[in-house]
Structure formats: structure tokens, C-alpha cells
Amino acid sequence: MEYIQITKENIDAEHICCAMSGKQGLAKKQWMRDRLDEGLVFYRSVERGKCFIEYIPAEYAWVPVDAEGYMFINCLWIAGSMKGKGYSNELMDKCISDAKKQGKSGVCILSSAKRKKEFLSDPGYLAYKGFKISDEADCGITLMYLPLHEDAVPPEFKPCAKHPHTDETGFVIYYTDQCPFTYYWVPRVVEAAKENGIELKAVHVSDRQTAQNLPAPVTNYALFRDGKFITHAIQSDKKFLALAGK
């Protein structure tokens, strides 16, 4: 497969594989544009499909981790008919090669302890590539890492991410523009909650410092209920109402 790297010069013209059309795609592109000078890298397949990788030096990642000297993979996504053709390996190898060239200690990524969870990378595949679990949050989300030299210090979750909890009552959603689907679904969930008398607070996180100190291991979307972390999976209005018992 041939791949296109998204840059400041082509970001306006190029399709972002995961982005839905319309304003939600523009919000994702603006989030990316603001990260490019921080070292964000985004490769997508030449074919217009869901086959891409996005990574950034961990110091600039919007997640509560202590991973100095690492490269953090925001997302590795292969969907539909593109699965099973080795594209994950090609994209992962691009990231690992970049990390080595930049003298990084290793590469890290979010996954899950026992089985693949929605929107997270497959732990089985990561283990096959040599990744190991370096830390685990109470909710079962793990931080996996691939060390690139023997004395690499394993990355860790910050305490706020390892023990996700808020003091808020009712439902609370923390979300960013890192994922275009939040732009589409969060307002619809907010409206559905209002129409059904459900207590819901939506917190739009718009800066890295706040994201790096959120009370959840996943920050592009984190749903809480009465202080307890419920899910990182982006909810449609219908899924949210079902979860709320409506």
C-alpha cells in the first residue's frame, strides 16, 4: 500500500480517513493542524478508506501518562476490506522507524487487559509486535509499550488516569476534537438527555494541559455516571438513552 502523510501544505485538500464529512471533519483537521508543529504524524492509505496511523511525541499527547522520551500512538485503524493484508504492520513499522530515528526510548499506546475494546488497539496484535503492558487503569484500559533500548523506563498512567473518578453527580462527558465523531454525537446526546430529563454535563476539553490531567485514561471521550467511569466508547443518542435506562 502507498501512504500519504498529512502536512500543513495538504491538510485542507486531503481526506482524513476517520473523519465524517462536514463540520466534524473540519474540527478534526483544526485539532491536527495545531499539533503538527509539536511533531504529530498522520499517515493514511492512498486508497480512500479507513487505514491510517496517528502518533505524536508523548510529551505532547493528550493523555494522562508519564512517558517522557516515548512516541505515543493516538490511533492505528484498519477497517473493513482493508483488514488482514498487512497494513497494520506497515503503518506500525513507520511509527517505530520514526521513533528510532528521533532517538526515542520506545513507543506506547492504549489497549485493554483481556480482550479488544471498541476504539482501542487489539492487545493480541500489540503483543505480536513485541509490546508489553506497562500499566493498567482500574477500568481495564492498559498502557502498552515497545522499548527501543534495554534501559528504557516503562511509561505509566498518572494517578488520575489509573484510578478514574469524579466528584460529579449524574452523567458527565469529557471530550476533545481529536476524534471527529465526538463533534457529531456529543451535541445529540446532550439534546437527548435534556429531552428526557437526564442530568448530563458535557465538558469540551480544548487544551493539552487539561487533557493530560483528566480523571480517565482515554480523553477524547470519557463518560462517567455519579463519579464512576462508564465507558470510553463514543455513544450515539440511542445508545446513551439505553445506557441511562430510557
Image: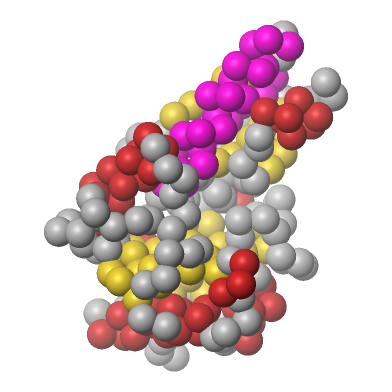
Q: Nearer the viewer, residue 242 or 141?
A: 242
In the displayed structure, 164 sits above or below 10; it is above
Residue 207 in percent (x, y) is at 33, 38
Q: Is residue 62 left or right of residue 38?
A: right
Between residue 147 and residue 242, name the one nearer to us.
242
Q: Quadrant of residue 120?
A: bottom right
Q: Residue at x 64, y 11 (%)?
A: 194
On the rendered structure, is 70 left or right of 118?
Answer: left
Quick one: which residue is furthest to the bottom in this view? 150
Q: Total of numbered circles in the picture?
A: 0
Q: Which quadrant would the N terminus be assigned to in this image?
A: bottom left
Residue 191 % position (x, y): 60, 16
Q: Position of residue 20 (x, y in %)?
A: 46, 45
Q: Is residue 185 magenta?
A: yes
Q: Quadrant of the C terminus?
A: top right
Q: Is residue 192 left or right of residue 24?
A: right
Residue bounds of the magenta highlight:
170-196
User: What residue is drawn where x is 61% and y is 56%?
Assistant: 119
Side of 130 relative to 65 (left or right)? right
